[in-house]
Amino acid sequence: MIKVRDLYKSFDGNKVLKGVNFSIETGEAVAIIGKSGSGKSVLLKHINGLLKPDSGEIWVDNKLVNTLSFRKLQNIRAKMGMVFQAGALFDSLTVGENIGLALRRLTKLRENEVLERVQSSLIDVDLQGTENLMPAELSGGMKKRVGIARAIAIKPDFLLYDEPTTGLDPVMTDIINRLIVKFQKINSITSIIVTHEMRTVFDVSNRIIMLHNGKVQFDGTSEEIKNCNDLAVRQFITGDSSLVC
Amino acid sequence: MQLLFSPIIAIISFFEGIGRYVLLMTSMFRSFNRWHKYISYSIDQMIIIGVKSIPIIILTAFFSGMVTSVQSSYQFSSWIPDWYVGSVVGESVLLELGPMITGLVLTGRVGATIAAELGTMRVTEQIDALESLSFDPVVFLIFPRIVAGIVMFPILVIVADFFGIFGGWFTASYTMDVTSFEFFKGFRTWFHPWDAWFGLIKAVSFGFAITSIACYYGYFTKGGAEGVGKATTLTVVISCVTIVFLDYVLAVMFL
Ligand SMILES: Nc1ncnc2c1ncn2[C@@H]1O[C@H](COP(=O)(O)OP(=O)(O)O)[C@@H](O)[C@H]1O
Ligand SMILES: [Mg+2]
């Protein structure tokens, strides 16, 4: 369970989050949408403690994340896979080492089990045989999938995706959407998918939260959002810039 | 109003920067008790920072030694014997040229590399990714680089000293009327072991200054590729100024 209470965050006077509230039950797949720069990535980074709030609370499984020390955060992070926008693969390590690094740090697997898990995670994202490639040799879509493999390899309870399909072609978008749905179903993971692609939203989530002006503008199901009359929401899902809000 | 405030804001952000630098270094030093976990990364960095810099250090030190030799003999008037060249070369290389050349060359070679590397890792979210895997990025990225700097700079300065003096001797014995015996007689007459030690103290301080400044700018990079460029430039500029400044402060303190 993830709960965010009255989250405020600003950077050098730029107020990004101005009182965000929501909670997500175990096993839910929630899409967080909003314009570029609306603070979606910032919000996601608060959930696994990469950023500290100016004020407010972030609860993960009844632990108050924002007050935990680096060491205590490790227990939360060992259950939480994070997929970064452009993959964020370590470019001095091979694909296999990227995934292995996560496993060696966050799990108690033995060395041969680590190697097996690296293989099986790569198979999960349809990239078998790439473990000796360097990140620089991969296409954008492959990097994102390796990023996903690194996140799921630790068999997390929570998966946080930051724009998993942004900038990809429609076929690759579909592949990644299916992956997200697959991991969601198999392990009843709690997932948060940050995106501004409506296709991904409707494909992978059963609940949508929209950030607007630093607050939650909408929180509901995909049926509800299609019938929502709020201007900001309508503008976003239809992509109609002539609507004024 | 604008004119009045902008220098004040500049001063405030200058001290803010120093504060952040001190905090970063504090958390780096606090991780020293876990050094054994990170020693292998330090060794990697020692190879990158140290071993790979040897050729450029040899080249620059050798030429500086040669120039010192030529210029001192040019400046000596007729009543100073040419074999004094050995002492001038020895003293200036050990005290000033060796550490200074190493410092300035490595600002470009090592400082810029570290800043660009960490800056790229920051803007491509690799540092966030490390942290999300429960690695402490300060310990994992900064500690090994600074340790490598502190360990390798004195070694590189010794190399520079050696080749600087060698360069001075080379010029003196092949283009001037100074025999090897006379050159080293001059060298020994005014040689104080303390001068060599002082050069090494400088080396350690320069090593720390360059690597820590580069880590600071790299680690706090923001704003994409442009930000990485800015971080790299700032690293080189600030490191050069710091080295020259440290050079003076240490001379006042120890000589
Ligand atoms: N580390 C940071 N330092 C300063 N400003 C930041 C930082 N991270 C994000 N911001 C700012 O916060 C705002 C929201 O950014 P972000 O969460 O990345 O938006 P998005 O919704 O597109 O993911 C932007 O204006 C961005 O410039
Ligand atoms: Mg974002």
Image (cartoon, coloured by chain):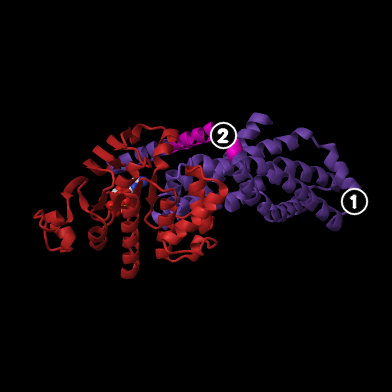
Chain colours: A red, B purple
Instruction: State which region is magenta.
Output: B17-37
Q: Where is residue B159 in the image (x, y as percent from the top left)?
A: 74, 47
Image quadrant in which you'd find residue A149 = bottom left
Residue drawn at x 85%, y 57% is: B174
Q: Which residue in the protein does label 1 denote?
A: B179
For the residue pair B80 and A13, the one nearer the viewer reads as A13
* Residue B116 visible within the image: no
Crowd rating for badge 1 (residues with CA inside 10 Å; few <14, some 14–19, many 20+): some
Asked if residue B25 lies in the magenta stretch, the reply is: yes
Relative to the observer, which residue lies in front, B129 or B25?
B129
Q: Mark 1 lies on which chain?
A: B
- The question of residue A126 being in magenta is answered with no
Q: Which residue lies furthest to the front in this view?
A: A186
Callout 2: chain: B
Q: Which amino acid does label 1 sit on?
A: Thr
The label nearer to you, 1 versus 2, is 2
Q: Marks 1 and 2, Cα distance to the nearest angstrom?
A: 54 Å
Q: Is the magenta stretch mostly helix, strand or loop?
A: helix
Amino acid type at circle 2 is Arg
Residue named by callout 2: B34
Q: Would residue A194 appear left or right of B141 to someone viewing this image?
A: left
Helix, strand or loop under label 1: loop
Quadrant where the N terminus of chain A is found in the figure: top left
